[in-house]
Image: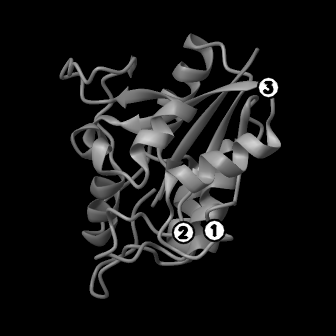
């Protein structure tokens, strides 16, 4: 049976830790492909609007360009927010028949996973896999893909806001988009050094 990964998130911005863990998961679990699904708006992040979807999508596209096995599905961007994993999985499963699905979540999502929309039904449709970049050796009750990588979207946004470099944290093409669009900047700070 084919094995397909689904990796949802705001990807605001996508960074090397996302990509390294996705590649590790693809190879470790012998997945046919990893589907990146950018959220229109996460139900757990409703208080802070994300960067506009077209820009997040553009950053994701350039980040995974020419990466074998990585694809993007825009289904959540085509639905009204918030973006629920249950709806996404049902939609992808309808198109990708005869496959086993692995849904990837960050270790920070494990404590509230049971509160996700229609979680009991979702858990029957996918195998959850935790992407752990902290190296804390958490025992979440799900398989873990673990690489200690101290990179986060929150930190990247803060670095840009302070005028600090994000070189080596994001793909160069993503840094170019952030600079071009003046994303995450505070008005009185200089552009990031990439």
Residues 189 and 181: in front is 181
Choose top left, top right, bottom left or bottom right for residue 6.
top right
Mark 2 vs mark 3, foreground winner is 3
Visible in this render: residue 72?
no
Q: Which residue is mark 2?
A: 40
Q: Which mark is residue 177?
A: none
Query: Which residue is at 30% across, 68% downward?
Result: 163
Q: Is residue 8 left or right of residue 48?
A: right
Residue shown at 28% from the left, 37% from the top: 110
Q: Earlier in the sequence, mark 1 or mark 2?
A: 2
- The image shows residue 59, relative to residue 48, as above or below, that is above
Q: What mark, if any, has residue 98 been given in the picture?
A: 3
- Return the residue at label 1: 77
The Cα–Cα distance between marks 2 and 3, rounded to whole angstroms, is: 27 Å
In the rendered image, is residue 183 in sight? yes
Q: Are marks 1 and 2 in contact (CB under 8 Å)?
A: yes
- Badge 2 density bin: few <14, some 14–19, many ≥20, Cα 10 Å: many
Place of residue 134 in the rendered image (x, y in percent of width and height, measured from the top left): 24, 29
Find the distance from the CA under tag 1 to the CA under tag 3.
Answer: 25 Å
- For numbered disc 3, what is the local secondary structure? loop
Pointer 3: residues within 10 angstroms few (<14), some, or many (20+)?
Answer: few
Tell me the quarter of the picture where residue 157 sits: bottom left
Tell me the quarter of the picture where residue 142 sits: top left
């Amino acid at each position: 049976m084919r094995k397909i990964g689904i990796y949802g998130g705001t990807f605001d911005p996508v960074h090397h830790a996302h990509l390294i863990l996705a590649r590790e998961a693809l190879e470790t679990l012998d997945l046919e492909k990893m589907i990146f699904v950018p959220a229109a708006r996460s139900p757990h992040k409703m208080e802070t609007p994300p960067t506009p979807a077209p820009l997040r999508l553009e950053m994701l596209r350039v980040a995974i360009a020419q990466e074998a096995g990585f694809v993007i599905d825009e289904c959540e961007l085509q639905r009204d927010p918030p973006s629920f994993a249950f709806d996404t999985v049902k939609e992808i499963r309808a198109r990708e028949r005869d496959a086993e699905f692995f849904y990837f979540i960050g270790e920070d999502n494990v404590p509230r996973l049971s509160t996700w929309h229609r979680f009991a039904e979702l858990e029957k449709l996918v195998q959850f896999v935790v992407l752990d970049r902290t190296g804390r050796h958490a025992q979440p009750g799900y398989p873990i893909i673990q690489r200690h990588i101290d990179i986060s979207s929150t930190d990247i946004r803060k670095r840009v806001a302070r005028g600090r470099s994000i070189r080596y944290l994001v793909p160069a093409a993503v840094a170019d988009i952030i600079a071009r669009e003046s994303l995450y900047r505070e008005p009185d700070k200089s552009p990031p050094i990439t």
